[in-house]
Image (cartoon, grey):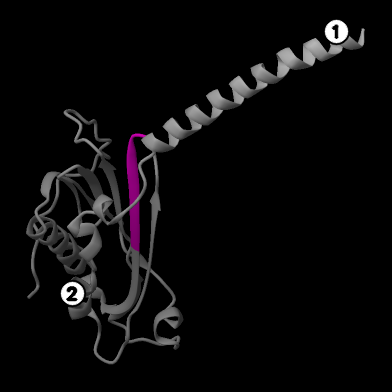
């Protein structure tokens, strides 16, 4: 009986070693195919974009602006995902609501083109927000400018009172990119329907 148990153990050990070897090979191949974030997976537009140049001219004299931003990356087997968000807060003249939104859109389009991106689609208007779909190299990206929202002046100025013709507002601009190791021949973009974009006006 003891001899039979030893033979079973001798047979089982090589099988276990074989299974572990297969698992190591599979894990190694999986890691090899995994695409990791790096400076190469971020487009020039993604690295350099900031809304300050478009926003600051609309800031009311004597008021300061507050800007928050966050960014993140995600590795993947097929592509690397890059995200960045901006949320400027400032006090503006109420009449400049739509001109500021148009200026933001104009600035995004200009920076995309300057940084070598091709704009595939542009939709939206100053009231409902804008969306840009673009490509550059092995990257496909989307910029979304959401509609502005009115906020408590206290969060911007530290005071509750502003002039009757002024408003404290928050904007939200987000960038989403997918970088592929090899540029796909065909890609399907999910496009949100908007009204036809209004003409862009540069207040300067």
The quadrant of the picture occupied by the N terminus is top right
Of callouts 1 and 2, which one flags the residue occurring earlier in the amino acid sequence? Answer: 1
- Classify mark 1: helix, strand or loop: helix
Nearest the viewer among 84 and 99 is 84
The correct choice, above or below, for 53 with respect to 187 in the image is: below
Inspect this view and state whether residue 104 appears.
Answer: yes
Mark 1 vs mark 2: give the one in front.
1
User: Which is more toward the observer, 2 or 83?
Assistant: 2
Q: Give the vertical position of 101 relative to 82 (above or below).
A: below
Q: Nearer the viewer, residue 176 or 53?
A: 176
Report how far apart the C-alphas of labels 1 and 2 lie in the structure.
Answer: 81 Å
Please state the horizontal and vertical placement of residue 142, each as a whole percent of the image: 25, 48
**Which secondary structure, mark 2?**
helix
The C terminus, quarter of image: bottom left
Residue 21 position within the rendered picture, expressed as x and y whole percent measured from the top left: 56, 26
The label on residue 20 is none
Query: Going 13% across and 61% down the picture, which residue do you hit?
Result: 111
The disc placed on residue 4 is 1
Residue at the bottom extreme, as displayed: 62
Q: Quadrant of residue 120?
A: top left
Magenta run includes residue 181: no
Q: Residue at x 32, y 86 (%)?
A: 64
Tell me where the magenta segment starts and ends, as one range.
77-85
Q: Is residue 126 visible?
A: no
Measuring 27% from the left and 50% from the top, which residue is drawn there?
41
Query: Disc 2 designates what residue?
Result: 53
Q: Is residue 103 left or right of residue 149?
A: left
The main secondary structure of the magenta stretch is: strand
Tell me: residue 5, above or below residue 151: above
Position in image of residue 121 (x %, y %):
15, 43
On the rendered structure, is 133 left or right of 68? left
């Amino acid at each position: 009986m003891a001899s039979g148990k030893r033979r079973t153990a001798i047979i089982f050990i090589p099988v276990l070693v074989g299974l572990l070897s297969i698992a190591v090979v599979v894990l190694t191949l999986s890691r090899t195919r995994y695409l990791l974030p790096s400076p190469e997976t971020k487009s020039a537009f993604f690295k350099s974009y900031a809304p300050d140049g478009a926003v600051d001219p609309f800031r009311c004299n004597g008021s300061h602006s507050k800007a928050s931003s966050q960014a993140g990356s995600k590795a993947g087997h097929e592509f690397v995902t890059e995200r960045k968000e901006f949320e400027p807060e400032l006090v503006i003249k109420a009449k400049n609501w739509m001109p500021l939104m148009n200026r933001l859109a104009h600035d995004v389009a200009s920076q995309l083109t300057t940084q070598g991106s091709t704009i595939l689609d542009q939709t939206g208007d100053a009231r409902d927000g804008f969306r840009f779909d673009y490509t550059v190299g092995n990257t496909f990206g989307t910029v979304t400018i959401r509609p502005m929202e009115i906020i408590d002046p206290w969060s911007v100025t530290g005071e509750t009172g502003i002039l009757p013709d002024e408003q404290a507002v928050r904007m939200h601009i987000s960038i989403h990119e997918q970088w592929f190791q090899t540029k796909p021949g065909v890609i399907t973009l999910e496009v949100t329907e908007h009204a036809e974009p209004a003409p862009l006006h540069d207040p300067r």
